[in-house]
Image (cartoon, rainbow, N blue to C red):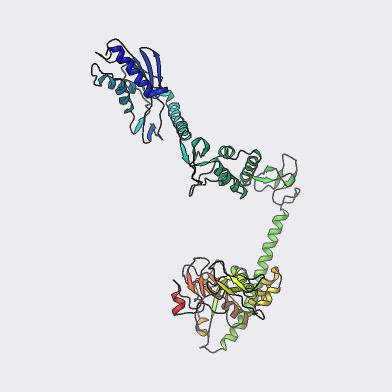
Amino acid sequence: MTNNEKQADEILVLQSIFDQKFRLMNENQYEILIEFDLSTSFTIRLDDKISTIQYLPPLSLIINYHDEYPSDDPPSFILSCFYFSKIDLEKLCQKIDNFSFIPGEVCVYDWIELIKQEITNEFIIRTSFEEQQNDPRALNGYTIENTKKIFQYLIDYNQKHQEDVFRNRFQSCSICTDIIPGVDCIRLHRCGHFYCRTCLNHYIRMTLENGKFGENLLCPQDHCKQALLPTEIKQTIQNEKLYERYERLTLQHGLESMKDIVWCPRCQSPVISGPEDDNLAICDQCHYTFCKKCYETYHFQKICPKDYLIEQMKLLKQKEREVVLAQFNKTKGQKKTLNEQRIATQRYRHIFIKLSEQNTLLQEILTAERINTDDIQFCPECHIPIEKNGGCSHMHCTRCNFDFTWQTTQERTKTFITPYLEHNDSTKIESMKEELNKVAYLVDTPIEEKPKQHEEIPSDQAHKQEQQENDNDLSILIDDESTIGSVILNRVTTCPNKACRKINVKITSDNWMICSACMKQFCFLCGSGVNGIKHFEKKCLRVTPI
């Protein structure tokens, strides 16, 4: 074959391989855009800046044929690349010159493979010039002043190319697992997870209906904490009214989180407030002047009526505390005289609770009492409380699928606490607390320093225990020497976990207790830890009446 025939055959082969990346200028000259085929990501570095990418812009190789190719000499060439420095392109030209040329054999494709091997694991953008040979075959516009722009351009090109590759391939939605074209998927910018438009649209609408928006509208992927961008939400839902609502709620949430923003009580517009000691606020929309604390028309008093009311409530609370303290001190002396007359060997039960937790404990006891007195029975199999609101006596437990017959009772069981349930919600706790304060002690001993509940000790030893200071709160000692005290002690127990000591209320007749604070499982009767049903088969009863 002649040189011209070999040149024509090489052009046809290269055209078929590189397709659109091949551009024929004339019969003896053509350009090939060489893309670096990298199977894995690599890093680009500019000084101390590092970024990981997978795609680079193509490098241009221009080939010029002559009459001696391929019989005697290789063809002439020109290399052009804007992100290669001049010295790097010159070194690449030298590699091509040093490539072993076989007379009579075409070599352009081998050159292309050699150029592709130039990028391996890292590409460094040079910020200083080295000695150059001024090889005219190495063309570029690389300057030190443009290195930052080149670095950012390579990052942007990689992102765009990744997006194009994603769109041109079939993808599997992470929610419905359907195989769909990438162009029909929404790929989240912050985390890279992708979903079909339909699934993501349903997810966004459901999340917005649940009151989550802004940075709280997260990627649906498990354990992904990246929030969706507003542009991604708008692109997905394609509903202007719904997106306007999303923007409005996001803006409102952002303003509400700002400490220097208050809302005008007249037109509900955000208002920037002044210093903390200045209560004046003026709305820019309706020009309403108001107090930023009470939201009423601005008043010139130094103390806002709202602050004054808060101070009065604090004083009232302190006064109530002093009254309770005086009442406890009064009954303490009377109680001590009666206790001294008792036999030293008499044994009793008692418990300590914080004064600040008294209302909470009484509320839990009243709730447990309501469950026991109302028309509620327990599943014989799993002991879950079940309320019957009508129908026949055949019952089906939805928890364990056990069928049983509802036991008809003549009259509901009443206890000492039952009458308190007939009071109004605002008075039943106060009434029960007033009754309890008449018979309880007020002490300053920390709860963790006292004996465990249900621990029986001689009364003479109990009253000789030293009292220690509790700077955090006063404590109440409740024993079983009164009716209300005995009722409370029959319902409460202390968590055996020494690091917890939480007081738990027994709501049902089940003695298998789980601490509401540390989740420790224990027996209500003996206080021992419970690791399974065997404890109740060998030692204590599982169910006992309260």
Q: How many marks?
A: 0
Query: Residue 299: horizontal and vertical position, in percent?
Result: 75, 49
Above/below status of 436 relative to 175: below
Q: Is residue 459 left or right of residue 296?
A: left
Percent position of residue 539, x then y:
45, 80
Pick whichever, 244 or 360, lies toward us: 244
x%, y% of residue 297?
76, 48
The quadrant where residue 288 appears: top right
Q: Residue at x 69, y 65 (%)?
A: 316
Left or right, residue 79 beside residue 236: left
Q: Is residue 505 left or right of residue 25?
A: right
**Which of the pair 315/432 is nearer the observer?**
432
**Residue 255 in the image: above or below residue 407:** above
Q: Which quarter of the picture shows residue 29?
A: top left
Q: In the rendered image of this protein, does residue 500 appear above or below residue 173?
A: below
Quadrant location, the N terminus = top left
From the viewer's side, name the closer residue of 368 and 58.
58
Residue at 53% in and 46% down = 218
- Residue 432 visible: yes
- Residue 214 figure quarter: top right
Q: Is residue 232 above or below residue 124?
A: below
Q: Quadrant of the C terminus?
A: bottom right
Q: Is residue 50 visible?
A: no
| Extreme-top residue of the structure | 67
Q: Where is residue 358? Give x, y as percent.
A: 60, 70
